[in-house]
């Protein structure tokens, strides 16, 4: 029996600061319903999907800020049962579709940039990941509302679950009796080789990654502060594709990567570029718009074998005894000048 699976990236277009949860939920339900009608078994949604990408704003009103998170405590139960968003998860379960979706998580003791993977068979959370690499700054670049800030270090704690792969047991029967091995990343994480390799070392076959990638933020990026919007957009798309294709290839895994796209509030553009990439690094499907859109492909998990068994046979070719610096050092230590 083959290990073929129909999967989708659900790209989500503009969500403004004033857009209500109810409106977003309707759009997400439409996307998952459309996917199910096309026999898709797994849909990956973006980072912080239920709201606008709030870390771009310097928010001083605590009540407004709190509203961007899902409160997930012993009393509320898992996010799938919380009142604001449970309609989405109920629909996915009714349709029998696995979903990964990103959201701001408030545990009562800490706030994280989180993604859950939920079984379409049972509605249970099979795995939860908290974003490790939080880009940007704690203080705003400036207070001009036109500036795209990047205040994740202000609004989230760094993820504390590491890069733990899991089996999507919900898809076992669809995949010839061997559950897919799944890994999760969120946005900026995809630019760091370390997380991908942790997943490669666990034999991950499908890497799911949602993102919000600004298409214009010279203050964040450095370099030419007078860069044109067209060049900035092209650079952002290039780097996004570069890292996903390269890391999918060097770790011999599929990647489903899903954008929050469009222009929020009429002035904060995000790149689209939702894609499904195969273990050889090729894009097999990608979005064509900046709006709500499904990107669908049928993937065969056995295609991971070529890389995993030959070029990137990690057990055979890696030399971990030479990689000590990777875990001993956080930053750059150049060799001394002689
Ligand atoms: N949400 C993100 O993590 N965005 C970053 C941008 C701001 C650099 C990204 O890596 O796409």
Image: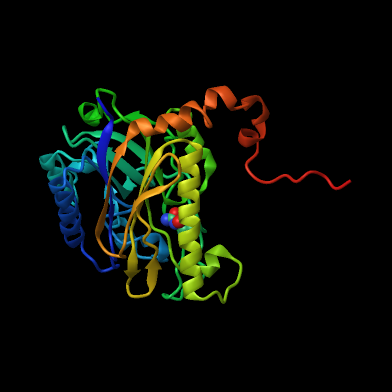
Residue 308 relative to residue 170: left or right: right
Give the vertical position of 263 relative to 191 (above or below): below
The front one of 259 and 66 is 259
Q: At 63% across and 26% down in the image, what residue appears?
A: 319
Coordinates of residue 91 in the picture (x, y in percent): 13, 46
User: Which quadrant contains ligand 1?
Assistant: bottom left
Side of 46 relative to 22 (left or right): right
Query: Which image quadrant: the N terminus?
Result: top left
Residue 4, visible in the rendered structure: yes
Describe residue 295's horizontal placement relative to residue 303 as left or right.
Answer: left
Q: Is residue 86 left or right of residue 193?
A: left
Residue 5 placement (x, y as % from top left): 26, 37
> From this viewpoint, is residue 47 visible?
no
Residue 301: quadrant of the picture: top left
Residue at (58, 73) in percent of width and height:
225
Rendered residue at 40%/60% (across/down): 55
Q: Quadrant of residue 39?
A: top left
Percent x, y for residue 16?
29, 68
- As drawn, the residue found furthest toward the left would be 94
71, above or below 322, in the image? below
Of residues 147 and 263, the one drawn nearer to the viewer in this rendering: 263
């Amino acid at each position: 029996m083959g290990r073929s699976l129909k999967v989708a990236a659900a790209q989500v277009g503009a969500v403004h600061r004033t857009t209500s949860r109810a409106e977003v939920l309707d759009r997400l339900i439409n996307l998952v319903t459309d996917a199910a009608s096309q026999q898709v078994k797994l849909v990956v949604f973006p980072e912080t999907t239920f709201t606008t990408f709030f870390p771009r704003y310097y928010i001083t009103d605590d009540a407004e800020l709190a509203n961007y998170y899902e409160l997930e405590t012993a009393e509320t139960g898992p996010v799938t049962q919380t009142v604001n968003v449970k309609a989405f998860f109920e629909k996915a379960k009714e349709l029998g579709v696995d979903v990964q979706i990103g959201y701001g998580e408030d545990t009562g003791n800490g706030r994280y940039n989180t993604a859950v993977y939920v079984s379409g068979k049972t509605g249970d959370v099979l795995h939860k990941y908290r974003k490790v690499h939080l880009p940007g700054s704690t203080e705003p670049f400036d207070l001009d509302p036109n500036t795209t800030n990047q205040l994740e270090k202000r609004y989230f704690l760094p993820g504390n679950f590491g890069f733990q792969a899991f089996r999507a047991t919900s898809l076992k029967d669809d995949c010839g009796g061997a559950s897919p091995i799944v890994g999760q990343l969120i946005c900026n994480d995809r630019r760091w080789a370390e997380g991908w390799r942790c997943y490669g070392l666990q034999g991950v076959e499908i890497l799911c990654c949602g993102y919000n990638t600004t298409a214009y933020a010279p203050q964040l990026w450095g370099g030419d502060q007078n860069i044109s919007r067209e060049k900035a957009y092209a650079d952002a798309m290039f780097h996004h594709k570069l890292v996903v294709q390269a890391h999918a290839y060097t770790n011999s895994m599929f990647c489903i990567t899903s954008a929050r796209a469009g222009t929020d509030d009429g002035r904060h553009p995000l790149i689209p570029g939702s894609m499904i990439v195969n273990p050889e690094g090729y894009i097999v499907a990608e979005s064509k718009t900046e709006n709500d859109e499904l990107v669908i492909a049928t993937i065969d998990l056995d295609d991971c074998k070529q890389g995993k068994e030959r070029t990137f046979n990690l057990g055979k070719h890696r030399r971990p005894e030479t990689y000590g610096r990777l875990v001993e050092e956080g930053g750059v230590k150049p060799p001394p000048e002689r």
